[in-house]
Image (spheres, coloured by chain):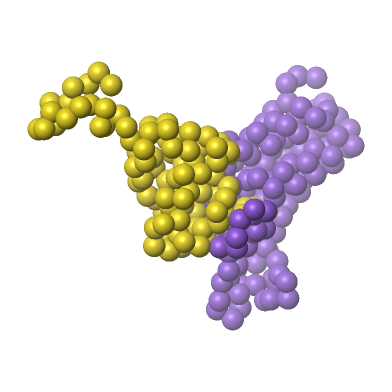
Amino acid sequence: MSEPTIVAEITTEPLDGGQLSARLCTLEDGAVVVFEGRVRDSNAGRRVARLRYEAYAEMAERVLAEIASEAAERYAVGAVGAAHRTGSLELGEASVIVAVVAPHREAAYEASRYVIEAIKQRLPIWKEEHYADGTSAWLGEQPAEGKAP
Amino acid sequence: MWDQTPQSPIGNSPSVAASTVAVRVLLFGVYRELAGRPELQIELPSGSSLAELVTELRALPGLERLPERPAVARNLKYASLSEILDPADEVALIPPVAGG
């Protein structure tokens, strides 16, 4: 198998998982796994109206490429593509997509899971939830050592 | 420092200029809102660490609420607070991430 293809993008444009996987697929690939993360209408019991994502875009693109490359090193895949959207998103829109193509399904599923979990842990992107009642809040795990800002 | 800057009228020792580092600090998300701006320029004594930069930042209005040990990136990579700053470093304070 040739060197896996890596695609990593931070963009304000709408995301299309089918289009990304079609771009990556070759005739060696018997399995295609596309993960799409979408904006939900509620979180922790509150009605969400829309989300806004802010990124440290220059760093986020590097980190996303690193994550995709790590997945391609760990699992026998043909290509790993990932994209994260920034800016204002409406309910139902995709905020993140991960597309993995591989000869077999096991590697495709595992690589896909690896990428989305690593994105959650270290991609420098921040989410501001805007609620139906007009208020908003930044989300994120509190840092282990720090005090809540 | 070999550059004998002619515009220094006092003819001060060039070591004065060499004894500080100027770093650009980027702020995102909730930290940007605390500071009320997306970017700062900070000058510190040469040899200062990222931890010392954070201490300096926490003395600024609004940033008192910055954690004592926030995640930081230096020149686009996650960095340890013990790292020593170089002149012209770009430092970013990374609030708890929430991608996906």
Judge left or right: residue B43 versus residue B12: right
Q: Residue B33: tell me if it is visible.
A: no
Q: Residue at x 50, y 62 (%)?
A: B65
A19 or B87: nearer the viewer = B87
Residue under the image location 89 percent in, 37 percent down: A105
Residue B88, given in percent of the width and then of the height, sits at 38, 34
Residue A89, image x and y in percent? 58, 62
Q: Residue at x 58, y 47 (%)?
A: B71
Q: Position of residue A58 (x, y in %)?
A: 51, 40
* Residue A15 to residue B44: above or below: below
The quarter of the rendered structure image containing the N terminus of chain A is top right
> Which one is nearer the viewer's eye here, A112 or B58?
B58
Task: Tell me the residue at 80%/44% (across/down).
Answer: A113
Instruction: Tell me the quadrant of the picture where the C terminus of chain A can be found.
Output: bottom right
Q: Quadrant of residue B17?
A: top left
The answer to whether B84 appears left or right of A23 in the picture is left
Chain B representation colour? yellow
- Who is closer to the viewer here, A130 or A27? A130
Q: How many marks?
A: 0
- The purple-tinted chain is A
Instruction: Report x, y in % for residue B49.
Output: 48, 38
